[in-house]
Image (tube, rainbow, N blue to C red):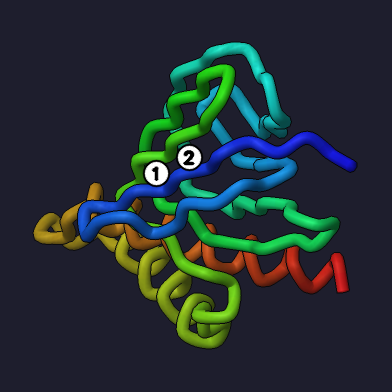
């Protein structure tokens, strides 16, 4: 039996998830990392992208929208800006949001908020990547 560790995910709205899991795979500023029980301590920046956890040999997929990870020997805590379950993602909506964000970023209009458009693009890509990654695993 695989060793488990406590995973806690906190959003600005409060506790999103707290459970014992076998592994966590997430994209950090240094690239994708997979964490198992008894991992060395680490603090890092979470990127906008797909994340998955494994428990009882079953995977759960999420779109995570930035944050901080704190890894200790016994527990991993994610403080995230936002997180969405795969099941809650509307792929059509994410694809449309991506196109709108790209149009805004390519616009020559000086009134366009570039940071907001980039943020919208990052969110839509995280959602699209989550759906695409999960669909590859089916």
Q: Residue furthest front?
A: 1
Q: Quadrant of residue 30?
A: top right
Task: Residue 33 in the image: state x and y as whole percent.
Answer: 68, 30
Judge from the rendering whether residue 84 lies leftward or rightward of residue 22; answer left or right: left
Residue labelled with disc 2: 47
| Image quadrant in which the N terminus is located | top right
- In the image, 14 versus 116, the foreground residue is 14
Which residue, as the protein is rendered here, is positioned at the far top? 40
Residue 22: which quarter of the image?
Answer: top right
Q: Which of the two discs, 1 and 2, labels the residue nearer the N terminus?
A: 2
- Name the spot of residue 47 as percent of width and height, x first: 48, 39
Residue at left offset 51%, top offset 19%: 72
Screen quadrant of the C terminus: bottom right
- Identify the residue shown where x is 29% and y is 58%: 117
Q: Which residue is mark 1?
A: 66
Vertical comparison of 62 with 3: above or below: below
Q: Badge 1 local density, few (<14 within 10 Å), some, or many (20+)?
A: many
> Where in the figure is residue 85, as x and y percent of width and height?
53, 70
Tell me the CA gap for discs 1 and 2: 5 Å
Residue toward you, 106 or 100? 100
Secondary structure, mark 2, is strand
Tag 1, which secondary structure? strand
Asked if 21 appears above or below 85 in the picture, the reply is above
Q: Image quadrant of residue 100?
A: bottom left
Q: Give whichever of 44, 128 is nearer the camera.
A: 44
130 and 125: which is toward the camera: 130
Residue sitting at 74 percent across and 52 percent down? 54
Q: Is residue 13 left or right of residue 64?
A: left
**For the residues bearing labels 1 and 2, Cβ distance under 8 angstroms:** yes
Give the residue at x 55% y 51%.
Answer: 19
How many labels were placed on the picture? 2
């Amino acid at each position: 039996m695989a060793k488990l560790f406590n995973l806690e995910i906190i959003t600005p709205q409060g506790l999103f998830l707290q459970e014992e899991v076998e592994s966590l795979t997430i994209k950090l500023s240094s690239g994708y990392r997979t964490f198992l029980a008894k991992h060395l301590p680490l603090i890092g920046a979470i990127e906008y992208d797909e994340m998955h956890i494994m428990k009882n040999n079953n995977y759960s997929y999420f779109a995570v929208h930035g944050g901080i990870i704190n890894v200790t020997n016994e527990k991993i805590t994610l403080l995230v800006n936002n997180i969405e379950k795969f099941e809650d993602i509307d792929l059509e909506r994410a694809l449309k949001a991506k196109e709108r964000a790209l149009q805004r970023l390519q616009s020559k209009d000086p009134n366009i908020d570039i940071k907001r458009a980039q943020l919208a693009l990052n969110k839509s890509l995280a959602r699209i990547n989550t759906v695409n990654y999960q669909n590859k695993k089916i």
